[in-house]
């Protein structure tokens, strides 16, 4: 696990429980997205992977009405971090994201 539920709620500044199931789904989806995009399994010790997931979770949470709509817009910071993670670890790493 890269991001804990508590970390995600703090990052989102959510202090109510109505969206707990959604936040859990977004955490799992962000981590799976990162693994699928890079071919690497990361854990919480890789801070760049953590920031990537938390940024992606926030983007999806704050823009959930856009999910599923045809759009080519990716926040530049998300694409930049993903590129670094992809090329820095090359898909042949262990759980920590280190080669």
Image (spheres, rainbow, N blue to C red):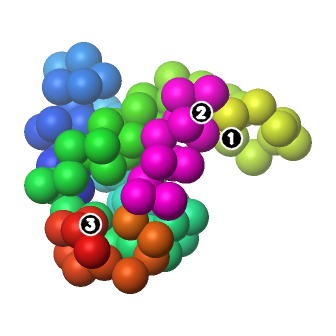
**How much space separates mark 2 and mark 1, taking CA atoms?**
5 Å
Q: Position of residue 34 (x, y in %)?
A: 46, 59
Q: Are marks 2 and 3 in contact (CB under 8 Å)?
A: no
Vertical position of residue 81 compared to residue 25: above or below: above
How would you rate the neighbour count of disc 3 (Cα within 10 Å): few for under 14, some for 14-19, many for 20 or more?
Answer: many
Badge nearest the viewer, 2 or 3: 3
Q: Which callout, 2 or 3, points at the residue further toward the start of the chain?
A: 2
Identify which residue is drawn at 47% across, 48% down: 84
Boundaries of the magenta span:
75-88
Q: Which residue in the structure is indicated by mark 3?
A: 97
How would you rate the neighbour count of disc 2 (Cα within 10 Å): few for under 14, some for 14-19, many for 20 or more?
Answer: few
Magenta-span inclusion, residue 84: yes
Q: Which residue in the structure is indicated by mark 1?
A: 67
Side of 39 where 66 appears, left or right: right
Q: Are marks 3 and 1 in contact (CB under 8 Å)?
A: no
Q: Position of residue 87 (x, y in %)?
A: 50, 59
Q: Position of residue 11 (x, y in %)?
A: 25, 25
Q: Which residue in the structure is indicated by mark 2?
A: 64
Q: Are marks 2 and 1 in contact (CB under 8 Å)?
A: yes
The label on residue 78 is none
Residue with the most extreme right position: 70
Q: Position of residue 58 (x, y in %)?
A: 42, 29
């Amino acid at each position: 696990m890269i991001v804990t539920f508590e970390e995600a709620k703090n990052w989102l500044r959510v202090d109510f429980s109505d969206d707990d199931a959604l936040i859990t789904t977004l955490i799992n989806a962000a981590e799976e997205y990162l693994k699928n995009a890079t071919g690497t399994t990361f854990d919480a010790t890789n801070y760049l992977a953590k920031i990537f997931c938390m940024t992606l979770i926030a983007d999806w949470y704050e823009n959930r009405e856009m999910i599923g709509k045809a759009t080519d817009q990716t926040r530049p910071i998300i694409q930049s971090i993903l590129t670094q993670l992809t090329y820095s670890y090359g898909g042949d790493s262990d759980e920590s994201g280190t080669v």
